[in-house]
Amino acid sequence: MAKLLNIYSRGYVGARNKFQHILAVDRVAFRVCRRNLEGTAALSPKLQTFVEKNVALCQPEKVHICDGSEAENDKLISVMVKLGTLEPLPKYKNCWLALTDPRDVARVESRTYMSTDNKRDTVPAGSAAKNTLGNWISPDDLNKAVQERFPGCMKGRTMYVVPFSMGPIGSPLAKLGVELTDSPYVAASMRIMTRMGAPVLQAIQNGSDFVKCLHSVGRSTEPNNPWPCEPDRTIIAHKAATNEIISYGSGYGGNSLLGKKCLALRIGSTIAKREGWLAEHMLILGITNPKGVKKYIAAAFPSACGKTNLAMLTPSLPGYKVECVGDDIAWMKFDSQGRLRAINPENGFFGVAPGTSYSTNPNAMKTIFENTVFTNVAKTSDGGVYWEGMEPNPNVQVTDWRGQPWTPDCGRNAAHPNSRFCSPANQCPIIDPAWESPEGVPIDAILFGGRRPQGVPLIYESFDWKHGVFVGAAMRSEATAAAEHKGKVIMHDPFAMRPFFGYNFGNYLDHWLSLEKTPGRKMPKIFHVNWFRKSDQGKFLWPGFGENVRVLEWVLNRLDGNESMAEKTAIGYIPSDGAINLDGLDEPIDTKQLFSVPKDFWLNEVEQIGKYFDEQVGSDLPNTIAEQLHQLRDRVNSM
Ligand code: OXD
Ligand code: MN
């Protein structure tokens, strides 16, 4: 209690009635805590201090320590149904629909910050007035922002204490977090997306450290608002030095489920740099060829480029099997044998709904109609869901995500383009048997990719590790609906990490380059893929989806060292004539266009990449990467 008094008297000198209120909350908190944790762990002193400090700051009416049980989840759901945050979808088992405030529908990159003492630790030294590779806030300004927002922000609400593990509990690659949130939607979603509850509290009690996450949807003037938020005052901030995340004003996805982008990527990448491993925006899949040989591949694509579809691919070629380890994030570390090992730190899929269908991703469709929270999709009169790309049923009425009657010809989207399903990963019919293996799966290849309608071949292979790191640094893609960008502009998105870097991108490149310096390591081969190249008439040149296994087959052949299957070009190795199996495809493939490396396009590409490096990275760009760019320019010039 003395500690609480201390915090109180620093924060609220003179307001005695507030102190009384906090004591009352404190008593409730620890009554709830004791009841919930009977027979399991108590709070560790560090966790107790963290909770007390933020109870004093946010002044919730109640505190609930989450144990992750079924009964607790039922309670959370019924609270949300009562409030109107969720409605049941009786067509499916244990599925729910959330419709957000229409102003709170995506990650808000412009309000997402890293806070470091030195700006340069976050933002590279590029010449541009606006750096897009790091958004920095000074510790003082962050403090001020917290003091302007958090005091009393949870009044009238319950603070949920959500203990979670990113990665299988006990894995040497896993990290723990505790999120304090006033959103039952967040607590219930964290139970799907992470390993959440009593075993994590126990691990913390046993001495494991945790990342401190504080989240509030913001102050609400309407007491019964089903989706409170404060879009004008939203801030998502990370303090890497102290492993802290602070998020205010949004209840949506990556802004509020703090284990995902905030911990697993931004804070994760800073920890990974310190500890010598990688935290990346990558899916992980296992692929077995007809001879029964299995390899694992990690792949980085910007948001909404079909990552979930690739992670759950149904191969069109006979004898191939693909299994899914994860669809969004990979934590990877070299083991003592020099193999790169990867875990999926998540426990669920937070996938983009529109475009997901039995034809594009049957495995996702078999995953998501049980125990799922859908957000901002349309609903149907038979108690189901609907979104763009799903096979429509003419016998049911559709209500769009804004609650308006919807018909296919009404000119509006039924579902928000960034609407989501949030489903447990273990429901995926092709989940890999090793997806929870504590030591992780061995990675043999890394794919980078993007949505490039022009100029970029279906696949090319880098010459070596350094060139591969350059290929990742030079990634570009069409903009996505997952963030607040508009239009189909081609954006630079190095390593598909632009919104997720936790530290200076120049240092990040140094870190990647340094990995091959330890002797005895088996470095994965690095490739670049583009499923989205279009003909001059605007038609996709490659069918994509299940047919992408034909491209993965070439990757496997190259991993086996098959020299005759590749041809050297200015940008890397491309498949030689006939090396990609096209047997049985419905339509003829214009391989000439699909694999062409147009000189003018690539001269411009080199120009754009150079400009980007100058403007965004400046003197922080490692010499090795600058040399790679020069070499590419020379090779393209001599085409
Ligand atoms: C995501 C994203 O939600 O990358 O996975 O935006
Ligand atoms: Mn993602």
Image: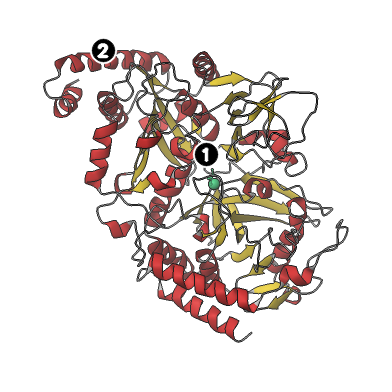
Q: Which one is in front, 638 or 387?
A: 387
Is 510 located above or below residue 431 in the figure? below
Q: Position of residue 586 (x, y in %)?
A: 87, 56
Give, as a three-letter code, the residue at label 1. Answer: Pro
Horizontal side of 118 relative to 446 (left or right) equals left
From the viewer's perspective, is the residue at label 2 or at label 1 nearer? 2
Q: Which one is in front, 400 or 109?
A: 400
Mark 2 vs mark 1, CA separation in Å: 37 Å
- The residue wearing badge 1 is 168
Is 94 located above or below residue 331 in the figure? above
- Which of the marked residues, 2 or 1, is nearer the chain's N terminus? 2
Residue for point 17% across, 28% down: 11
Residue for point 42% across, 54% down: 501
Give, as a three-letter code, the residue at label 2. Answer: Ala
Residue for point 60% across, 48% down: 304
Instruction: State which image quarter holds ligand 1.
Output: top right
- Please give the label number shown on residue 362: none
- The residue wearing badge 2 is 24
Q: Image quadrant of residue 215? A: top left
Does the rendering let one see residue 318? yes
